Image (spheres, grey):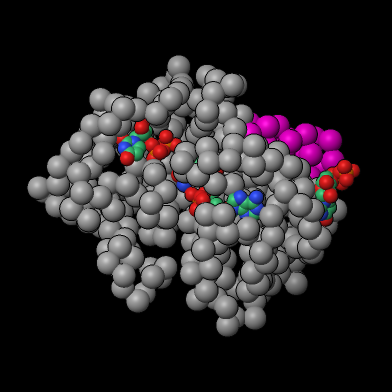
Amino acid sequence: QRKPSLEYLNRIGATGGKIPLGLKRKGLRVVVTGGAGFVGSHLVDRLMARGDTVIVVDNFFTGRKENVMHHFSNPNFELIRHDVVEPILLEVDQIYHLACPASPVHYKFNPVKTIKTNVVGTLNMLGLAKRVGARFLLTSTSEVYGDPLQHPQVETYWGNVNPIGVRSCYDEGKRTAETLTMDYHRGANVEVRIARIFNTYGPRMCIDDGRVVSNFVAQALRKEPLTVYGDGKQTRSFQFVSDLVEGLMRLMEGEHVGPFNLGNPGEFTMLELAKVVQETIDPNANIEFRPNTEDDPHKRKPDITKAKELLGWEPKVSLRQGLPLMVKDFRQRVFGDQKEGSS
Ligand code: NAD
Ligand code: UDP
Ligand code: UDP
């Protein structure tokens, strides 16, 4: 692996103050693709607060200007409407590559576009990282484990993925993105990091994006029945967005390539999740069963031993603590409050 320059180490504070230049950490130039989306916009908030110069690259497929417009007057912030499937020239130190729709409803809407985003988009961002010597972080997904035959999922598990199913554009796309990332690392000495993100929720999720937490919360607020797909016994592990952002930043700044699972090991069936939503919003909310979607993974729970040991990271916010924070934001947006997008 190419040795990072002293200037770079100094900038990220990795020199431990041993180098005279490094007493005061200088802001980094960071690009966040997909930075106008749910996770990206929270990451941008943290980077801006740290004093970095942040460039968001987003095509607004599922992202919104409202998620980042509170930074518009800050000269350290720049928003570029751009599709990562097209090449782009930028001069940066770090690339957080998030651009890709994450909700099954969104990524199935135009599956070929989803694959192009994952493969060509990731290729372009790796080409950029190679050209300017930037560190590159890929936000991969727990979906690379498919419908897992190992539980909980450890990073060494290779997964059980249908290559020709309706979810393949996303999970096979992300698997290829991981492959490209490792090939640029091995072949072109690009500094890379890979995060495998498990289901994440929080303020600024698209209200009608079809994901289970956003669906249940919006339904309960609108006094509509909570739609449980299948028998509701399938499980997921839900992580609050601030925990994820902390994990992504630790991974980027740390010395380990990964992949790292970033998720909350608390596992819930969809019926249990519905119950927590009822407790939080409306105990009288009804539950309505609907047919499940194709290839739906039966269970999912991260083993986060590796992230704990090597990144010193673990989630801090439980579902019962995090859900009310999301409900506050959804309440404002569902009922048309002026403060849309802020949190
Ligand atoms: P999101 O849909 O809110 O954000 C994705 C952002 O990428 C949006 O702003 C969208 O407009 C942008 N985008 C999509 N295609 C693009 C393209 N071709 N060019 C430029 N911009 C494009 O989703 P999110 O939940 O914030 O997810 C962010 C990342 O994290 C994604 O890569 C996703 O796969 C990954 N991830 C998220 C979760 C989760 O539960 N939220 C779980 C696993 C992985
Ligand atoms: N690329 C980009 N910005 C850059 C450098 C490269 O978008 O600053 C794109 C480039 O157009 C190419 C991809 O990244 O499609 C891969 O670049 P690389 O140099 O690795 O491969 P090559 O251009 O030799 O195929
Ligand atoms: N689901 C549900 N009701 C909904 C939306 C989703 O019961 O209104 C279920 C879905 O079948 C899946 C789980 O919730 O088993 C998580 O789905 P989501 O789309 O949030 O994310 P996934 O983990 O499948 O990518």
Residue at left 42%, top 68%?
Answer: 341
**Foreground: 153 or 337?**
337
Can the viewer see residue 191? no
**Foreground: 43 or 253?**
43
User: Residue 323's spot in the image, x, y percent?
Assistant: 28, 53
Q: Predominant secondary structure in magenta?
A: helix
Residue at left 59%, top 33%?
Answer: 169
When the figure is inspected, residue 258 is found, relative to residue 13, above or below; the finding is above
Q: Is residue 186 magenta?
A: yes
Horizontal arrangement in the rendering, residue 124 relative to residue 258 (left or right): right
Can the viewer see residue 277? yes
User: Residue 289's spot in the image, x, y percent?
Assistant: 23, 32
Residue at left 53%, top 68%?
Answer: 65
Q: Is residue 310 magenta?
A: no
When the figure is inspected, residue 149 is found, relative to residue 16, above or below; the finding is above
**Residue at the left extreme?**
284
User: Residue 87's spot in the image, x, y percent?
Assistant: 79, 53
Q: How many marks?
A: 0
Horizontal arrangement in the rendering, residue 174 relative to residue 94 (left or right): left
Horizontal arrangement in the rendering, residue 81 relative to residue 6 (left or right): left
When the figure is inspected, residue 194 is found, relative to residue 147, above or below; the finding is below
Quadrant holding the N terminus: top right
**Residue at the front extreme?**
109
User: Residue 89's spot in the image, x, y percent?
Assistant: 81, 60
Q: Which residues are magenta?
A: 173-194
Residue at left 52%, top 74%?
Answer: 69
